Image (spheres, coloured by chain):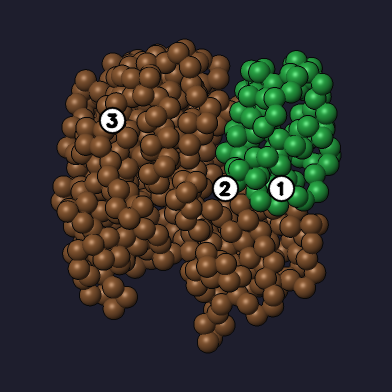
Chain colours: A green, B brown
Amino acid sequence: MTQQSSANWTEERVIGVLRELAKNEELPAHLVTGTITGADTVETLGIDSIGGVALIDQLETESGIPLPDDFLDFDTTVASITQQMNALA
Amino acid sequence: MNFIWPENFRFVGKSCPEGREVPGRIIAGRSALIAELLKAQGVLPGDRVAMWLTEGENQVAAMFGCWAAGATFCVLPSFAGRSNTERSQLRVDDVWSVLQPKLLLKGAGAELPDVLAGTVDVLELPALDAEVDETSDPDALIAGRGPDDMAFIQFTSGSTGGAKGAVVRFGQLMANLNAIAERTELTSADCMVSWAPLYHDMGLMAVLLPLSRGADIVLMETDHFVRRPTAWLETISRFGGTISTAPPTALKLLSRRKAQNIDLSSWRYAWIGGEMVFPTILKGFEDTYADAGLAQGVLQPTYGMAETVVGISCGIPGEPWSEQNGFISCGPPLPDMELQIVDEAGSPVATGTQGQIMVRGPSVMQGYLGLDSFAPEAWFDTGDLGFETAGRIYITGRTKDVLKRGAESFPATVVEAIAEDALGLRTGRAAAFASQRPDIGKEEIVLLVESRDWGDEQVRSVAAAVTKELGLQVDVIRNVKGGRLPRTSSGKLMRQKAAALYREGLV
């Protein structure tokens, strides 16, 4: 994946991480091209706790920021991931 | 029949990542207190008690407390608290109808999930700091329990989705614990570190196995691992853990997300099981943690199930795992465990030939709760496929319609019903199955759906519904044309055939 600045997270960037993980078969295949919006939650995207760990790990790798244990829950939205990433940067 | 209690139990969680020591005499005292409370609530020998407990101290104390009261415990399966849907309620009701518990135990101040609330009489345990009799004798807690007495009930995911409670008796429990202790060369010098949930056979084994030899125990809250997987390896490093257990998924996660500044040189036996083990996962984990002192021969793929208490076969300490045709050795059968690989007609197959795995031995259960018993000498059909070579067992797949992810089992029929409901389809329009992917080291979960109305919206609604109800991620959701799902002449869905067609790219 392309390394970008740790700050300046947008929903598009988070969605890009989700799509990349889906391409790598760590998240459901439908996320490669399917609709993902800011209002989508971890649950509506069909991601379970194992997929959630992969997502957190990738976000940490891309941002260089250690994320808190309670960063992600089933009802966490793409928009709130974006906000949290910017707040933690 | 006895257990050897350690001087101290250690508990690790988010609130105490450094670990909290609780003397064994306090846990024993708490067990005795729980036994008295159970008796006061009218629990009689032979009654069954359900447990919905999250704190390690309560879990261990309640297990022995139930035994001291003459009762049989059942740690409720995870789906009991997953969601508050009508289907979840039906599944819990199904468990209640089979288990018929006298009481449900919960921790002080704990809130029960809606699906559990109001269904069974509840006993709230005293707070963890409640005063107990520290002179209670741990041996007295199971005194008088014989080999034919029920020790616990483990619910398994039957392929039809109906609740099936595997009955484990003390004789079977001790036989399996002794066999595993012998194979793993467990001694009182060992230290078990476990985060596996107690509703899972591996989690229960992780508590009882060290007690069978007086080894130390460090219990991590499962949720602590889920939120921070590296905490598992940090805990092994901190406490000098020598033995631990995990599904391959955990190894995969931790190969991706490497724990830092740890020393795993104390770790001598990793019991890897609960789902299919692929070589790529073990290799990746060994490579990732070689510089942390993880030695070759520590990772030991194992094979077993709740119906055999937990273990059927496991690797020999220090012997590096081996591979045949892309499948991995799960070691020789445990002492006293007999294995037979048979063809569809029930005839034994030649060495190295795939067939259905049958087992028998002193730790194989003799029946599910409320269903007919098997004769002790009868072969038990595991529902798994595999072959045997040079005395080692290799697992290649399964005939039962169960999906596994992260060592949790999900009936295919339940996943299909959720998908059909989400799309308003008739029963039989969806097929869920696992497809082995040795290249990425996992069993891919696939859902094929026959629906005329299909698009992004339908895929999303199915994916979301399955995750909401089961906490399960479906890897691939695909539409197939009407009539393409294979069925028998009587119309019964053929999931294994569907899986074969999927792998060949024909659906």
**Amino acid type shown at disc 3:** Gln
Q: Which residue is mark 3?
A: B296
Nearest the eye: A66 or B401: A66
> Tag 2's secondary structure?
helix
The residue under the point 36% across, 24% down is B290
The answer to which quarter of the image holds residue B340 is bottom left
Q: Which residue is mark 1?
A: A32
Nearest the eye: B209 or B253: B253
Specify whether B149 is left or right of A89: left
The residue under the point 51% across, 15% down is B16
Residue B232 visible within the image: yes
Image mark for residue B79: 2
The residue under the point 76% across, 33% down is A14
Residue B73 visible within the image: no
Mark 3 → mark 1, Cα distance in angstroms: 37 Å
Specify whether B503 is left or right of B149: right
Mark 2 → mark 3, Cα distance in angstroms: 36 Å
Frontmost of labels 2 and 3 is 3
> Tag 3's secondary structure?
loop
**Amino acid type shown at disc 2:** Phe
